[in-house]
Image (cartoon, rainbow, N blue to C red):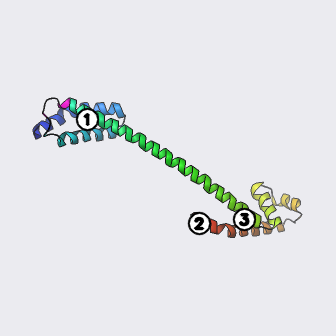
Amino acid sequence: MTTRDYNDCVKKYSDDLYRFALRYTGDGDASKDCVQDCFVALWEHRDELAAEGIKGWMMRTLYRRLVDRHRHLLVEREAQANLIEQQKQYDQHHNFELHDAMQQALNQLPDIQRQLVLLKDLEGYSYDEMAQLTGLNEQQVPVYLFRARKKMRELLTPIQKSTI
């Protein structure tokens, strides 16, 4: 096949190949890429091929390229799904570690501070409700709560640094 024969093939068959690829993929850019790969293969095999029968060879080559692309996309999607699943498992494990660390930090607080943190942060009680439940006055509740949160921050800082 001469260069002129090759150029004639490009002119004659590029539209037909593109339409076929577009129907197969539904993606214009991917179709153009596959047709381009097909013409690259034709150029690489130009010395082995005769000018007659080229369209059939091109269609088979394009079809194989489209199938390869489809398989590659399936493998990519599966790999992506596996990565997402691994990330979820990591996040779950990380959340368990964080939960354990929070529980350990809470257990290191004095009883009254632990009660206040649990009442405020987990149960959502107001300061006056917390004062009634614990026997503290309303001015003591925010002070004790501030000290409890500060202590928890100190206890959790090394854990946060190790997980980053």
Left or right: where does residue 87 sit relative to residue 32? right
Residue marked by disc 1: 61
Residue marked by disc 2: 162
Distance of label 2 from label 1 (alpha carbons): 53 Å
Bounds of the magenta segment: 49-55
Residue 155 lies, in percent from the top left, at 69, 68
The amino acid sitting under disc 3 is: Ala
Q: Which residue is rendered at x = 72% and y = 69% of the image?
A: 150
Foreground pick, 122 / 81: 81
Distance of label 3 from label 1 (alpha carbons): 65 Å
Residue marked by disc 3: 105
The reply to whether dot 3 and dot 2 touch (C-beta < 8 Å) is no
| 40 within the magenta span | no
Disc 1 is placed on an element classified as helix
Graded by Cα atoms within 10 Å as few (under 14), some (14 to 19) or many (20 or more), the crowding at tag 3 reads some
Disc 3 is placed on an element classified as helix
Left or right: where does residue 72 sit relative to residue 104? left
Quadrant of the image containing the N terminus: top left
Q: Quadrant of residue 71?
A: top left
Sequence order check, earlier mark of 3 and 2: 3
Q: Quadrant of residue 114?
A: bottom right
Sequence order check, earlier mark of 2 and 1: 1
Residue 53 visible in the current orientation:
yes
Left or right: where does residue 93 sit relative to residue 65? right
Foreground pick, 16 / 97: 97
The amino acid sitting under disc 1 is: Thr
